[in-house]
Image (tube, grey):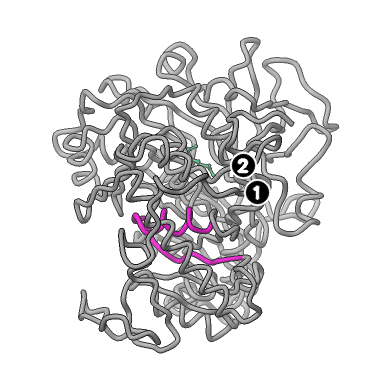
Amino acid sequence: MARVIPGIGSTERPSRDLLAVRAAATPDDLALIDVATGEEWTYEDFDRRVDRAARALTELGDDVGDGTQLERLGLLVDTRPAFTVVFFAAMRTGTTVVPLNVRETVTELAEKVERTGLEAIVCERDTAATALDLADRAEMVVASIDEVGGVDGVGGVGGVDGIDEVKSDRVRSLAGATEASGPGSVDSLERSAPPEIDPEATQLLMFTSGTSGDPKAVRLTVSNLVASATASAFRLGIDREDRWLCCLPMYHMGGLAPVVRSTLYGTTVVVQREFEPDATARVLATYDITGVSLVPTMCKRLLEREGGWRPPETLRFVLLGGAPATQELLERCLENEIPVYPTYGMTETASQVATATPEAVRSHEGTVGRPLVGSEVTVVDDDGEPVAPGEPGELVVAGPTVTPGYLEPEVTEEAFGDRGLYTGDVGYRDTGGRLWILNRRSDRIVTGGENVDPGEVVDALRTHSSVAEAAVVGLPDDEWGERVAAVVVPAGDGIEYASVLESCEERLAGFKRPKTLAVVDELPRTASGTVDREAVRNLLLEDGVNVSDAHR
Ligand SMILES: O=C(O)CCC(=O)c1ccccc1C(=O)O
């Protein structure tokens, strides 16, 4: 199969580590700026840190016991530069990274740790306690990129932000491994050739929500990531001065993709740990940001700031994805001269499949644009046959960005057909090849850019002894796009809201917990016996009680 970038992700010639190739080409260009600390790394700095971290991972592998390299590494680290260092270090050691959502509970994470058979997990100070908890349930080596005490006695536990209690000789310290220099640091300019990597190896195992049951673990190869970053550039363009603001979680595809893109292009990422409308608006203006990835909720919150949001002159694009953007939001973007690029994508395709330009947003209301170069989208009917332009059907995606499959072969088997990956999303195309999305993954709830599988919430509710049955849907929400809502059928005499909610708190991340509840004697069902989701939605709109607004 022909590959787009010779030398990187190529099957004809040895494939080279993409950060190392980049560092050799433009060592003095700026790779990354950390808003929190003001640190700036050139590509040479970045490469050195990655080299040190790769060595630390190799040692960690030795520790796992069998003297071989680490196969799978959990990453329980929030959006910060060290995340990117561990990611590229793992590419160098041939280790699969399993990014974990730091907002999830131990219960949710434990299931993922077990399914992926993690041998080791990298945490930070804030997630060390969770990582240790996880290691109690599954045998795993825990390493921290911050100093939290440890066997090698590096540093103490400084009482930072009250989180000073995590002190365990079970936490290995990687603090220092992600730093710039130290003994044994390699000068990338002296390296004869960038390290070879296997472009078809699984670089990432990333979780994504389905609609009924377990989150899916998506395998992505280096070549998927490179193909995606390459195709993205054909739609958004590249400028040497580009600075991409990363304020989306890096443990999701939409947050990690800009890091891969920017490294391939040799441009700069600006990392902001957390989106906050005022702070993000300030960063956009003061860091000469040229591009930013946002979910619709974030974009809306920027526009609704006091005094509104005027994009800085440097801004070339706002890549708006993760959830459908409303026409109202897109119009407000255009009115405010925001160069908005609504995008349709998924973890399974290493981010973008189709992306509309601001011109297309103006001329073709509601479109997500044409597929990116190399991506092929077929709209099919129930028999899997392609339909005519204008006819709705399921979107099937093929091309070099598409995952080779999920962790479990039976899940892969079910998702793929002759024409590619069956997305479960419904849409249509026009004669010009532009796509429209009608509804995404039917039952999946998208709240503030986070995907929630209703089945997972139902399972959590049903573990409570007072709940016999439950149904979960998304209700429209001004702030979050959708909010999680549940109807429950009591098992006995009644339901204690407080106790049910408490049990959800133990099992579900904040964004997955029901914000609206209703109690019914019986779930509404269709003639065929399945839960009538439309009736459940109406019931909740009429009789639902709002129990919480907290999204975290
Ligand atoms: O919907 C998904 O799961 C993928 C979302 C995604 O990648 C994304 C989300 C927000 C902004 C930009 C992007 C992107 O495609 O890069």
Residue 115 spot, x, y in % from top left: 66, 69
| Of pointers 1 and 2, the one earlier in the residue sequence | 2
Q: Amino acid at mark 2?
A: Ser
Taking the image as shown, residue 338 lies to the left or right of residue 224, namely: left
- What's the distance in space between the residues labelled 1 and 2, CA to CA? 6 Å
- Please indicate, yes or no, whether residue 509 appears anywhere in the rendered image: no
Residue 409 spot, x, y in % from top left: 79, 56
In which image quadrant can residue 258 be found? top left
Q: Secondary structure at mark 1?
A: loop
Residue at the far left in the pictured view: 307
**What residue lies at 61% left-to-right and 42% top-to-bottom?**
15
- Please indicate, yes or no, whether residue 471 appears anywhere in the rendered image: yes
Q: Is the CB atom of the residue marked by disc 1 within 8 angstroms of ligand 1's nearest atom?
A: no
**Residue neighbourhood size for the residue with mark 1, other residues' Cα within 10 Å, grouped as few (<14), some (14–19), many (≥20):** many
Do the residues bearing badges 1 and 2 touch, measured as CB atoms within 8 Å? yes
The residue range painted magenta reads: 72-90
The label on residue 198 is 1
Q: Which is nearer the eye, 281 or 364? A: 281
Residue 551 spot, x, y in % from top left: 37, 59
Taking the image as shown, residue 171 lies to the left or right of residue 66, namely: left
Q: Which is nearer the eye, 23 or 130? A: 23
Residue 149, relative to residue 532: is it above or below?
below
Q: Which residue is mark 2?
A: 15
**What residue lies at 45% left-to-right and 52% top-to-bottom?**
483
Q: Tell me the quadrant of the picture where the C terminus can be found.
A: bottom left
